[in-house]
Image (cartoon, rainbow, N blue to C red):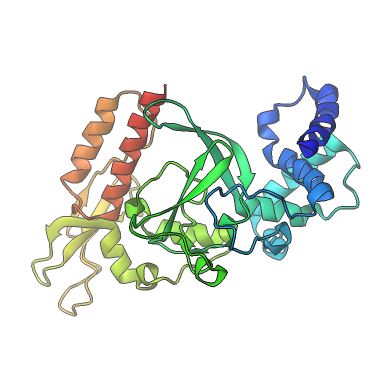
Amino acid sequence: RISDEIYHKLECEAYKKFSKEIKFEEFVIPRMIARLITRLNIDGGQPEHDLCINVPKSIDRRTWYDLLGHRDEIICSDRHLNVWLKTIKQIELLFKDKFNNIDLLEIFGKILINRFRVGFIENLFNGRLAIGWAIYLTTSRFNHSCQPDLLQCSYDINMRLKFSDSNKIIPQTTLEFDKLTVSYRHQNDFRLKSPLTYVPNRIQRRTFVSFFFFNCHCIYCNDDLCNRYDESATNHLCYKCGNPLILQLYSQKPNLSIINCISKNNSCQTEQIIDYVNISIIDYTEQSIDIYEEKLSNIQQILHENSILLLQEREKLFFVYQKLIND
């Protein structure tokens, strides 16, 4: 409570000077940095209360200083460096030289990589709405898995760890607790309640490398050939090897996709295009729910029922309906 009062005083001083010039919703990271510096001066990075509300007291607490800042990787990444340069300008605008003696890049890196969305229950249908960001020290300790042990569910400012297997309970020892996994893909998505949508794909793995500086080598990602089958298998079979044909992007015409076989069977010519299809995915630009339904129906006629791409399109439609309920 004391830290909130100190921080609000600091932030209000900045707001009074620039309230007409600044859209404060665009200054989320600078404001998080300022709040965190305030907290560090009070509790030294070891908060009294853990925002993960169902962690056993027997588990060793994690501190702010256990987090990795990835400062060396950030300055070598165009994506992160651009955010950092924008952030440092915003900090200088809001707070002038108040933080000159603090390693802001280290704090920036820890916040950027380890922040989680904060949400709250909005209505009787359990629709959740993002209202901000927070650092959950306990959740940040877990390693990634494309089929994780834990789902992350936030309620108000608190986060609750939930097993994807309802028969499991949270371990009471730190050694066993640290073996649990979460999905980095949905690190900031508190809406998911089932592990079924935590599925690997090539885009996801590239995101891991470019954003989290992490390359997944789990059994679901390691064999790229098998992964591509799981990802975009169609309901058409190859007449030579019997495997599902694969839907892939067509580089020459972005509006088209191609269907071919990528089997390891030597009898198959993997470079041969078997068919061309025009597939339209759900992109949230249309206003009518009927259009979303029609798109999903068309995709279902092409993709295998267990295709990861199809699962992801169904997930999108679920969130569209959820948004309608919330609105």
Q: Quadrant of the N terminus?
A: top right
Hey, which residue is sitting farthest left in the picture?
A: 239
Query: Which residue is found at the position 69% from the left and 42% from the top?
Result: 29
Residue 225 image position (x, y, % from top left) = 31, 70
Residue drawn at x 35%, y 49% as measured from the top left: 194
* x 33%, y 42%: residue: 315
Q: Residue 16's quadrant in the figure?
A: top right
Q: Is residue 99 left or right of residue 326?
A: right
Q: Is residue 168 left or right of residue 24?
A: left
**Which is nearer the eye, 104 or 77?**
104
Residue 88 image offset from top left, x and y in percent = 78, 45
Could you say which quadrant of the image residue 59 lies in?
A: bottom right
Give the side of residue 299 with respect to residue 27, left or right: left
User: Which residue occupies the foreground of this view, 10 or 41?
Assistant: 41
Check the image and name the residue furthest to the bottom.
266
- Is 189 in front, or is 307? 189
Would residue 79 be seen by someone viewing this image from the given angle? no
In which quadrant will I find the C terminus?
top left
Q: Nearer the viewer, residue 220 or 6?
A: 6
Q: In the picture, residue 15 is in which quadrant?
A: top right
Count how many numbered circles sit on residues in the image.
Answer: 0
